[in-house]
Image: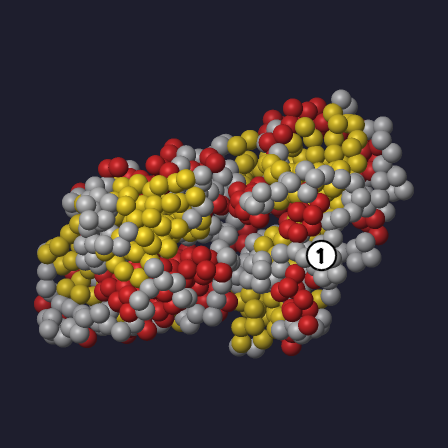
C-alpha cells in the first residue's frame, strides 16, 4: 500500500473530487484522495443534496464559480448509462412579492454584467416553462438557462474517474483521517484509522471535509468559522398528475426547471412522477461539529415543515394531499460570510476548500487547484480567502450567532449597504464615546463600529439643502441626506473623520528598504519622511492591493492597509518574508488610532492644536512628520483620500480622546463637523481615487486601473515587474472610466450593466453622488472603443435605463491646487 503522496486530499465529496480533477489536469501526480466512508454514495452532503446548480447570484465571484460548475458538469461523460449525470433544465427564480420582483430585476441586470443569460417572465410565461406552478401566486420570475440539476454523487464519481484516468490520483474509501502531523510549521504526514494505511507521509494536505472541517481544523489551530445546519427535504409519493413520466426512462427524471420561491425560502424539483421540496423555512438547527456524527443526514422533524408544506401546496397545486415517500433533515455548511473558505492556512502545506455547496464546487476545485499550482487563481479570491477573517470572526460565539443569522437570511433580499445586524459592538474605536455624543449612525466594518453619518449634522441640511437631492426606494435604503451635507462641509470648510479602519504593517530591520521595495511597484527607496502611494501586484500584474507607505527611518517603514483586509495582507507579507532574512514584520495597528482632518480650513484648525509649523513650505504634500498635539506625539501624513487639504493623524491609542478633544476645540471657531464614511466615499469618488475590491483587484492590472504611474519599471526587481514590462508593451483593451449620469434621477449602487445600445460593455464598479459637482458619478471598466471622453452610454438600474457620459477624470481639482495649497 502506498505510504507517501505529494498531496493528500481529505474528503472525496464533490469538492475533493473537483480539486483532484483540476490538479491532475494541471499536471499534478501522486495525489491520494481519502474518504472516511464509501466512495461517492456515502454519508456526506454531496450524496443527499438535491443537486440544484443555481447559476446566478448577486456575487460576481459566486456567479463565476457557478457558471463554470454548470459548464464543467455538463461536459462530463455520464457516470452511469441509466442516469443523466447532468440535466440542463434551467432554473426559475419566482417572485410572490413586489419587493422580490424588484430584486429579480436587479439580478437580471447583474446577469448582463456577469455575462450570464437570463429572462424576466410573466406569470403565464413562467407557467409555460413550469406547468406545475400556480401563476396566480406569482408576480413574475427570472429564468436562467444555465441552471441545472445534477446527481451529485455521479458528478463526484465522474470527476474522480477522469482524475484517476490521468494516472495522477487515487481515491481510497473507508480511511478516516485522525490527525495531521506538523513539524516546524510544515505538514509532514496524515494519520488514519485504516490499519492498512495508518500513516501517509506527504508534502501537502487539502481539507475538503466541509461540515466536518472544524474537527481537524481545531485540532491543528486552524479556525474554520462555519457550522452545519439542518435543512429539510421531502420527496412525495408518485402523483397522479405525473403518472406519464416513466421511471425507467432517464430523460423523464427531470424535465422542468428547478424552481426557487425565495420569499418563503423554498425550492422545488422534479423526480419522475414525484416532486421534491426543499425548505429553509424553519428555525436554524445548528449542529456543532462534534455532534454531527457519521452522516450528514438526520431524522426529519415534521413540526418544522407545516408552514412550508402549506405554502408548497399553494405554489404547486398538484402537491395538494400528497404523501411523502422520503423525508429527512440534510446538513449543509454555512460560513460566517456566506462564502467558501479556500487557501493555505498558517501551517505550510495545509490547504482548505470547505463551506462550499454543489453549485460552486466545480469553481472551488478549479480555484484551489490554480492557487496551489500557480500561486494565484484566475478569479479574484479575496472573498473566499482563508486568511480573510478577523480574530473575533473565528470565535465559537461569533460563528454561531452569525451563521444562524445567515441561515435565517439565506434567501432574503440584502441591500449592498446593509450592515450586519448581529452581533454588534464587537469592536469599538478609541473615539467611540465622542462619536456617540455626536449621534453617529453606525455601521460595522471588520467588526468595528464606524460612523456612516452623524445625526447631529442635520443642522447642516438647511445650509446645503438645495444641493443634496433626495433618493427614493431601493437607492435610499441605508443612506441619509446628511452624508451629502458632511461631504459639502468637508469641501467648503473642514471636517474630522475617524480613520480607525486603517491598519499598519510595520517592516523594520536592516533589510527593510529592499524588502518593501520588492513588495511594492512604486519606488519606496526615498528619504525618511516620504509618503508613497503604491500597489502590490500579483506575478501576472493584477493589483493585489493599492496602499500608502511611509518611511519613518532608514530601517523602518509603515504600510497602511484597510482593516478589512489586514489578515490577508499580513499573511501575504509574511509569506514573502518567510525565507530567513533581515526584516521584522509586525502588526502595530492596535497601538495606534487615526483621524483625518480635511478641508480648506484644515491647516487653520491644526495650527491651533499644535505648535508645529504646518505651512505648505514646512510641511509639503506627500510628506510625514512627527508633531505634538497636546501631550501626544502624533505622526502626521499630508495626504488625503477626500481630495482636500489636510492630514492623516496617527495617534497613540491611549492618547486618542485627548487628541480628538484638542482638535475639536480648535475647530469650534470654524464650526468644524465630524463626518462619516458615507461622505468619505463620495469625496474620494469625485476626486477619482480608486476603491480596492471594487475599482481595483487582482483581475485587473495597474494600467487598466489607471494606476500605471505607480509601477516603476526602472527600479530593481519587484513582484509583478516582469508582467508589468510585458503589459506596458501592449495596447490597452479596456480601462477604468469615469461616468456621470445625464439624468438627475439616475443612480447606481454597483454591478449594474453599462450598455452601448443592447450590448453590455461593462458594469459599475463603484458609484455615488458627487455633491460638489452636482451629478451622480460611477466608475466601470470599458473597452477602449467605448472609453473616449464624451462617449454616450447607458446604465440599467432595476430595469430602468439612464443615459451616462464618459468623462475625463478627476472631476474635482484636476490641477491638485486644493491638495497642494
Whether residue 186 is visible to the viewer of this picture, yes or no, is: yes
Q: Quadrant of residue 148?
A: bottom left
Residue situated in front as seen by the camera: 377 or 233: 377
Instruction: Tell me which residue sits at (43%, 43%) in the image.
Output: 186
In this rendering, is residue 653 above or below 120? Answer: above
- Direction right: furthest residue: 617
Horizontal side of 21 relative to 794 (left or right) equals left
Where does the image place residue 81, in percent across and percent down from the top left? 17, 74
Instruction: Tell me which residue sits at (16%, 58%) in the image.
Output: 235
Residue situated in front as seen by the camera: 35 or 669: 35
Where does the image place residue 259, in percent across and percent down from the top left? 29, 63
In this rendering, is residue 568 above or below 94? Answer: above
Where does the image place residue 665, in percent across and percent down from the top left? 76, 27
State the quadrant of the N terminus.
bottom left
Where does the image place residue 5, in percent across and percent down from the top left? 33, 54
What SS does tag 1 mark? loop
In the picture of the structure, the residue carrying the numbered disc 1 is 716
Horizontal side of 514 relative to 267 (left or right) equals right
Dot 1 surroundings within 10 Å: few (below 14), some, or many (20 or more)? few
In this rendering, is residue 344 above or below 288? Answer: below
Amino acid at each position: 500500500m502506498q505510504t507517501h503522496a505529494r498531496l493528500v486530499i481529505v474528503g472525496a465529496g464533490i469538492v475533493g473530487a473537483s480539486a483532484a480533477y483540476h490538479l491532475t489536469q494541471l499536471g499534478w501526480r501522486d495525489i491520494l484522495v481519502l474518504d472516511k466512508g464509501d466512495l461517492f454514495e456515502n454519508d456526506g452532503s454531496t450524496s443527499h443534496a438535491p443537486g440544484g446548480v443555481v447559476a446566478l447570484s448577486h456575487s460576481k465571484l459566486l456567479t463565476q464559480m457557478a457558471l463554470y460548475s454548470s459548464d464543467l458538469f455538463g461536459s462530463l461523460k455520464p457516470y452511469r448509462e441509466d442516469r443523466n449525470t447532468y440535466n440542463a433544465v434551467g432554473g426559475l427564480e419566482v417572485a410572490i412579492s413586489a419587493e422580490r420582483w424588484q430584486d429579480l430585476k436587479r439580478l437580471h441586470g447583474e446577469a448582463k454584467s456577469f455575462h450570464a443569460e437570463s429572462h424576466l417572465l410573466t406569470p403565464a410565461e413562467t407557467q409555460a416553462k413550469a406547468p406545475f406552478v400556480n401563476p396566480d401566486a406569482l408576480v413574475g420570475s427570472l429564468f436562467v438557462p444555465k441552471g441545472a440539476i445534477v446527481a451529485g454523487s455521479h458528478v463526484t464519481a465522474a470527476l474522480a474517474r477522469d482524475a484517476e484516468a490521468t494516472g495522477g490520483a487515487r481515491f481510497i474509501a473507508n480511511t478516516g483521517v485522525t490527525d495531521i502531523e506538523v513539524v516546524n510549521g510544515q505538514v509532514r504526514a496524515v494519520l488514519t484509522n485504516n490499519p492498512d494505511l495508518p500513516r501517509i507521509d506527504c508534502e501537502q494536505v487539502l481539507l475538503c471535509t466541509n461540515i466536518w472541517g472544524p474537527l481537524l481544523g481545531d485540532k491543528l489551530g486552524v479556525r474554520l468559522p462555519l457550522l452545519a445546519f439542518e435543512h429539510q427535504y421531502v420527496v412525495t409519493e408518485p402523483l397522479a398528475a405525473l403518472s406519464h413520466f416513466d421511471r425507467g426512462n432517464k430523460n423523464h427524471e427531470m424535465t422542468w426547471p428547478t424552481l426557487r420561491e425565495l420569499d418563503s425560502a423554498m425550492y422545488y424539483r422534479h423526480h419522475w412522477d414525484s416532486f421534491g421540496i426543499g425548505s429553509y423555512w424553519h428555525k436554524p438547527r445548528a449542529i456543532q461539529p462534534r455532534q454531527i456524527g457519521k452522516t450528514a443526514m438526520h431524522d426529519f422533524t415534521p413540526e418544522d415543515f407545516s408552514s412550508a408544506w402549506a405554502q408548497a401546496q399553494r405554489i404547486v397545486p398538484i402537491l395538494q394531499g400528497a404523501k411523502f415517500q422520503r423525508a429527512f433533515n440534510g446538513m449543509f455548511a454555512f460560513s460566517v460570510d456566506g462564502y467558501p473558505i479556500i487557501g493555505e492556512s498558517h501551517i505550510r502545506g495545509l490547504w482548505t476548500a470547505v463551506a462550499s455547496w454543489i453549485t460552486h464546487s466545480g469553481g472551488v476545485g478549479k480555484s484551489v487547484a490554480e492557487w496551489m499550482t500557480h500561486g494565484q487563481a484566475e478569479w479574484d479570491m479575496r472573498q473566499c480567502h482563508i486568511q480573510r477573517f478577523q480574530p473575533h470572526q473565528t470565535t465559537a460565539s461569533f460563528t454561531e450567532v452569525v451563521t444562524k443569522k445567515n441561515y435565517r437570511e439565506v434567501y432574503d433580499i440584502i441591500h449592498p449597504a446593509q450592515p450586519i445586524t448581529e452581533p454588534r459592538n464587537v469592536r469599538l474605536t478609541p473615539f467611540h464615546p465622542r462619536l456617540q455624543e455626536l449621534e453617529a449612525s453606525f455601521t460595522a466594518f471588520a467588526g468595528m463600529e464606524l460612523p456612516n453619518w452623524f445625526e447631529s449634522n442635520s443642522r447642516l441640511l438647511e445650509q446645503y439643502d438645495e444641493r443634496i437631492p433626495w433618493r427614493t426606494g431601493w437607492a435610499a435604503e441605508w443612506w441619509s441626506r446628511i452624508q451629502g451635507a458632511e461631504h459639502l462641509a468637508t469641501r467648503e470648510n473642514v471636517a474630522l473623520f475617524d480613520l480607525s479602519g486603517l491598519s499598519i504593517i510595520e517592516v523594520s530591520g536592516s533589510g527593510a528598504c529592499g524588502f518593501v521595495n520588492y513588495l511594492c511597484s512604486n519606488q519606496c527607496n526615498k528619504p525618511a519622511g516620504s509618503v508613497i502611494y503604491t500597489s502590490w501586484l500579483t506575478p501576472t500584474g493584477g493589483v493585489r492591493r493599492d496602499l500608502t507607505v511611509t518611511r519613518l527611518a532608514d530601517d523602518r517603514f509603515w504600510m497602511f492597509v484597510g482593516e478589512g483586509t489586514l489578515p490577508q495582507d499580513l499573511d501575504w507579507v509574511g509569506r514573502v518574508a518567510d525565507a530567513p532574512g533581515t526584516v521584522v514584520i509586525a502588526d502595530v495597528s492596535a497601538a495606534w488610532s487615526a483621524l483625518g482632518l480635511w478641508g480648506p480650513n484644515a491647516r487653520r484648525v491644526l495650527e491651533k492644536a499644535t505648535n508645529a509649523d504646518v505651512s505648505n513650505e514646512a510641511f509639503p504634500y506627500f510628506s510625514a512628520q512627527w508633531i505634538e498635539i497636546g501631550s501626544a506625539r502624533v505622526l502626521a501624513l499630508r495626504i488625503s483620500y477626500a481630495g482636500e487639504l489636510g492630514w492623516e493623524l496617527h495617534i497613540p491609542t491611549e492618547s486618542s480622546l485627548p487628541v480628538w478633544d484638542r482638535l475639536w476645540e480648535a475647530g469650534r471657531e470654524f464650526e468644524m463637523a465630524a463626518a462619516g464614511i458615507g461622505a468619505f466615499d463620495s469625496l474620494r469618488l469625485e476626486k477619482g481615487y480608486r476603491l480596492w475590491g471594487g475599482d481595483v483587484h487582482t483581475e485587473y492590472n495597474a494600467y487598466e486601473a489607471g494606476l500605471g504611474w505607480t509601477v516603476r519599471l526602472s527600479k530593481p526587481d519587484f513582484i509583478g515587474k516582469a508582467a508589468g514590462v510585458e503589459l506596458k508593451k501592449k495596447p490597452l483593451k479596456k480601462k477604468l472610466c469615469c461616468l456621470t449620469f445625464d439624468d438627475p434621477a439616475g443612480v447606481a449602487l454597483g454591478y449594474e450593466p453599462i450598455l452601448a445600445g443592447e450590448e453590455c460593455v461593462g458594469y459599475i464598479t463603484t458609484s455615488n453622488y458627487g455633491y460638489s459637482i452636482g451629478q451622480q458619478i460611477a466608475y466601470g471598466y470599458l473597452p477602449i472603443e467605448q472609453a473616449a471622453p464624451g462617449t454616450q452610454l447607458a446604465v440599467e438600474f432595476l430595469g430602468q435605463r439612464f443615459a451616462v457620459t464618459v468623462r475625463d477624470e478627476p472631476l474635482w481639482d484636476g490641477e491638485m491646487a486644493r491638495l497642494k495649497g
